[in-house]
């Protein structure tokens, strides 16, 4: 990641894998203000590492930015890179959270992975880092517990 070579505003190829995907960051214009940014990925897909069958999830990422913001085009391309990536639900969810936390150095970050059933059992995965800043409103992620989503 380099701030001088953003993918924004130029043609970008789809990444082959999450490991090769470029995630870009930009300076936070309000680094002295506590606020929450939310990204919702309603059509996230990856592959089961055992069967190769597709898995589907709704991902909700909430973060209180520190010095950096994630650039949304690069985030979309990164999310797309999981489409042909074989990994368990827990691995996908936690790996995305850790990569964003390492890149952005947020005051707080949480990710909720609301996965559709595999083998008849839905698996929801939650990960967070940091403490929620005082007086910051953290809304519910808005995804109901599984009832035939």
Image (cartoon, helix red, strand yellow):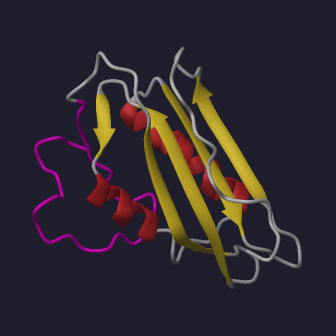
- 133 to 14, vertically: above or below: above
- 110 to 133, vertically: above or below: below
Q: Is residue 2 visible?
A: yes
Q: Quadrant of residue 2?
A: top left
Quarter containing the N terminus: top left
- 67 to 126, vertically: above or below: above
Q: Which residues are magenta?
A: 1-28
Q: Position of residue 113 (x, y in %)?
A: 65, 56
Q: For the point 13% across and 50% down, which residue is it?
A: 5
Q: Main secondary structure of the magenta part?
A: loop
Q: Position of residue 7 (x, y in %)?
A: 18, 58
Query: 61 and 96: which one is in front?
Result: 61
Q: For the point 30% across and 32% down, which residue is it?
A: 68
Q: Position of residue 114 (x, y in %)?
A: 69, 61
Quarter containing the C terminus: bottom right
Q: Is residue 17 visible?
A: no
Query: 43 and 142: which one is in front?
Result: 142
Left or right placement of residue 10 versus residue 115 in this view: left
- 132 to 102, vertically: above or below: above
Asked whether residue 20 is drawn in magenta, I would say yes
Q: Position of residue 41 (x, y in %)?
A: 50, 63
How many marks overall? 0
Q: Quadrant of residue 124?
A: bottom right
Q: For the point 40% across and 61% down, which residue is it?
A: 78
Q: For the point 16% across and 58% down, which residue is it?
A: 8
Query: 74 and 109: which one is in front?
Result: 109
Left or right placement of residue 10 versus residue 101 in this view: left
């Amino acid at each position: 990641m380099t701030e001088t070579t953003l993918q924004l505003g130029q043609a970008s190829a789809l990444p082959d894998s999450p490991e090769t995907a470029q995630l870009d960051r930009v300076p936070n214009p309000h680094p002295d203000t506590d606020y929450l940014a939310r990204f919702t990925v309603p059509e996230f897909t990856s592959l089961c590492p055992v069967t190769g069958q597709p898995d589907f999830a709704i991902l909700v990422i909430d973060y209180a930015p520190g010095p950096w913001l994630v650039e949304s085009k690069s985030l979309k391309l990164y999310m797309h890179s999981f489409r042909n990536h074989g990994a368990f639900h827990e691995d996908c969810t936690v790996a995305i959270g850790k990569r964003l936390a390492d890149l952005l150095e947020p005051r707080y970050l949480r990710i909720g992975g609301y996965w559709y059933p595999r083998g008849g059992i839905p698996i929801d995965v939650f990960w967070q880092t940091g403490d929620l800043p005082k007086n910051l409103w953290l809304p519910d992620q808005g995804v109901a517990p599984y009832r035939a989503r």
